[in-house]
Image (cartoon, rainbow, N blue to C red):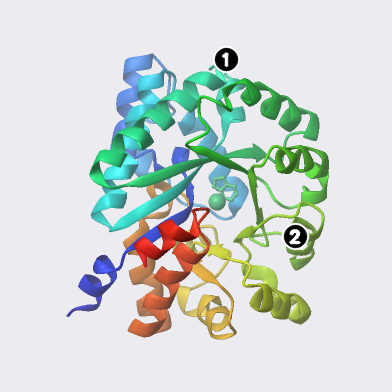
Amino acid sequence: THLHDFIRGLPKAELHLHIEGSLEPEMMFALAQKNGVRLPYPSVDAIRAAYHFTDLQSFLDLYYAGAAVLQTEQDFYDLTSAYIRRAIADHVRHAEIFFDPQTHTERGIPIATVFSGIARALRDARQQGFSGSMILCFLRHLSEDDAMATLEAALPLRDDYADVWIGVGLDSSEAGNPPEKFRHVFAIAAAMGLHLVAHAGEEGPAAYIRSALDVLQVERIDHGVRAEEDAALMERLAKQRTPLTVCPLSNLKLCVVPDLRHHNLARMLRAGLCITINADDPSYFGGYMNDNFIAAAEALQLSRAELGQIARNSFEAAFVSPEQKRIWY
Ligand code: ES4
Ligand code: ZN
């Protein structure tokens, strides 16, 4: 079979997907009109044409502006449903979706609206054999007090969303905002029984990967591509099988790597790390799950055995029971 068909046929789990980053220009434009939100673009084509980034911050500025069109529970439902359709088409069976409540509560949207719309879409998708859960991400450019207030605001929703809300994460501007800034809020989330992940080593140094592991006690590292700068850390990640949720097209678009042929995910995989491939913000970075697999496979000449290993790693790294994993792979 052709490489593309082989990749499409692999069952996969997606573990690094910002739901606000799956907002396609068409939906952004339609929601802006419906909700009376002014966008600095006259057309769908103008939105797409603006997607050229020089670094993480240049992307985040557009990403937060775009997310402002999301207002109602139905908006969050439609956004999530559209992502799930693309995921199912890519043979993604399970997704652990990041969401950024602070982006919305800052604009006066109740956190319950955000939870409800995303969760309703995930629950409806079960009828199609799709499994999905939610990871609440704190914005690291804001204060720990702000993160703490967000966790407290989500606390009353815990029981109603126990079947879908499984963890917390840390995203947004990495440089200058080390993991340890959020040590208290992560300790409380851990005590609540939530899973823990954090973006680390995307633009920030390998030391941030270490403090995410040692101070925050995260179970997976999102990105983590700068781990290679620390040989002892690499050995530890391989030995512990700490998953790295790598996002090749994201790294390319945000100039974390100059060219996918220079991406280190193949080397890290061959060094025994639990490497997964994910889309991050597919609408902004030019592709969903299979586009990321195909781009990495072609640039790095990954073998079918390696592609199969990466897909299996995604289930190994998923926050689901061993029984469910045995059913999936
Ligand atoms: C993100 Cl690529 C990336 N990095 C950090 N924070 C983010 N939020 C959305 N996408
Ligand atoms: Zn991300």
For this rendering, which residue is in front, 193 or 42?
193
- How far across and down, in percent of the image, does residue 60 sit? 57, 42
SS at mark 2 in the image: helix
For this rendering, which residue is in front, 23 or 197?
197
| Marks 2/1: CA–CA distance | 34 Å
For marks 2 and 1, give the one nearer the viewer.
2
- How far across and down, in percent of the image, does residue 137 sit? 61, 40
SS at mark 1 in the image: loop
- How far across and down, in percent of the image, does residue 320 sit? 49, 53
Please tell me whether residue 119 is drawn above or below residue 323 in the rendered image.
above
Give the residue drawn at x 44%, y 28%.
40
Query: Label 2, on which residue?
Result: 213
Task: Determine crowd level at label 2: few under 14, some 14-19, many 20+ residues with C-alpha closer than 10 A.
Answer: many
| Placement of the C terminus among the 4 image quadrants | bottom left
**258 left or right of 41?**
right
Please tell me whether residue 297 is drawn above or below residue 30 in the rendered image.
below
Query: Label 1, on which residue?
Result: 108
**58 left or right of 188?**
left
For this rendering, which residue is in front, 256 or 78?
78
Residue positioned most to the front: 323
Res 241 quadrant in image: bottom right
For this rendering, which residue is in front, 33 or 316?
316
> What amino acid is labelled 1 in the image?
Gly
- How far across and down, in percent of the image, does residue 216 sit? 77, 51
> What amino acid is labelled 2 in the image?
Leu
The answer to whether residue 287 is visible is no
Residue positioned most to the left: 1
Res 172 quadrant in image: top right
* N-term mark: 2 or 1: 1
Res 315 quadrant in image: bottom left
